[in-house]
Amino acid sequence: MGIRKNARDLTTTEKSAFVAAVKQLKAQTTGRNYDWFVTTHINYFAAVGGIRYAHQSPSFLPWHRQYLIEFEKALQAIDPAVNVPYWDWTTDRTTTGAPFTADFMGGNGSGGNGAVATGPFAGASNWRITVSPSSSTSLRRAMGTNTLPTSAQVNSVLNIAAYDAAPWNSSATGGMRNRMEGWQTPNLHNTVHVWVGGHMGQQDSPNDPVFWLHHCNIDRLWSRWQTRWGFDNGHYVPGANTSGVIDLNETMQPWPGVTPAAVLDHRNTYTYA
Ligand SMILES: [Cu+2]
């Protein structure tokens, strides 16, 4: 079972092992390589067959949980010691501190939304963007144009007892999910994508490896919510018979046989440090 650590606590060896595994996955030319994950996020960004799987729906959290598990498995096939770390943006809030150091994720884009200039993913020869709606072949960031969410804002979301509420989309106000996803105040997840900017502000956001650290933190916050309110089936809605979204026991494409119910309790698969 894996333990997912805070990125700021990784040793130099752990940081370089994560970077090496990510780069090796990117270099693979067949199967579930890095670009397969980028393409999958683009394919499920909007509704597929009238069903919203990855965004603006209750399955935002379980869909990305499975997405992280699949990505982590792909990394562990390369290096069994690697786990995805999380970026706690309530404590690491600068463009130059963890995880944006030269030995890990690298720093800001040069000039507004330019290519990332430092670290292992700087420049197209180190990290070539091949799946993108833009023409950029280098990883781009434009960090710090807004303000990262605070721990008080996180706590306000974790205090909401209801998982989600009708109308189950980006205008839902009654549950935790939409405030965690970020279409209602305090807009947690979306705000962080905007703060990093560049590719992170687009459908192809997984082109930026910090995507995984951000979504690992979102998954950790959901796990904290579950620790408080419950890991059981009663803490996912809708239970059944709601069209256009994924009910508790419906399969989430493109993960064969994987339902929200199947991923609610992650504690036998991985835990958070
Ligand atoms: Cu995201």
Image (tube, rainbow, N blue to C red):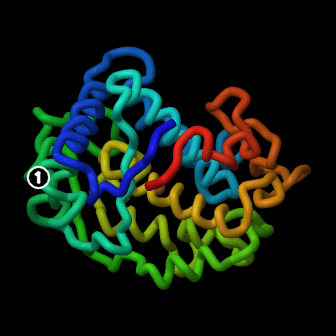
Q: Is residue 9 above or below residue 34?
A: below
Which quadrant of the rendered structure holds the C terminus?
Answer: bottom left
Report x, y in % for residue 13.
Answer: 19, 40
Residue found 53% across the figure and 64% down from its top: 221
Dot 1 falls on a residue whose secondary structure is loop
Residue found 68% across the figure and 27% down from its top: 256
- In depth, the one of 222 and 132 nearer the eye is 222
Report x, y in % for residue 220.
Answer: 51, 58
Residue found 20% across the figure and 34% down from its top: 128
Q: Amino acid at mark 1?
A: Ala
Left or right of 87 on screen, residue 265: right
Report x, y in % for residue 105.
Answer: 21, 50
Q: Is mark 1 within 8 Å of ligand 1?
A: no
- In depth, the one of 267 and 62 nearer the eye is 267
Q: Is residue 64 above or below residue 16?
A: below
Left or right of 204 on screen, residue 56: right
| Extreme residue toward the right, this view | 241
Q: Is residue 104 above or below residue 129?
A: below
- For disc 1, the marked residue is 102
Residue found 42% across the figure and 48% down from its top: 4
Q: Quadrant of residue 63?
A: top right
Report x, y in % for residue 118.
Answer: 9, 51
Q: Quadrant of residue 88?
A: bottom left
| Extreme residue toward the top, this view | 30
Q: Residues within 10 Å of mark 1 (few under 14, many from 20)?
A: some
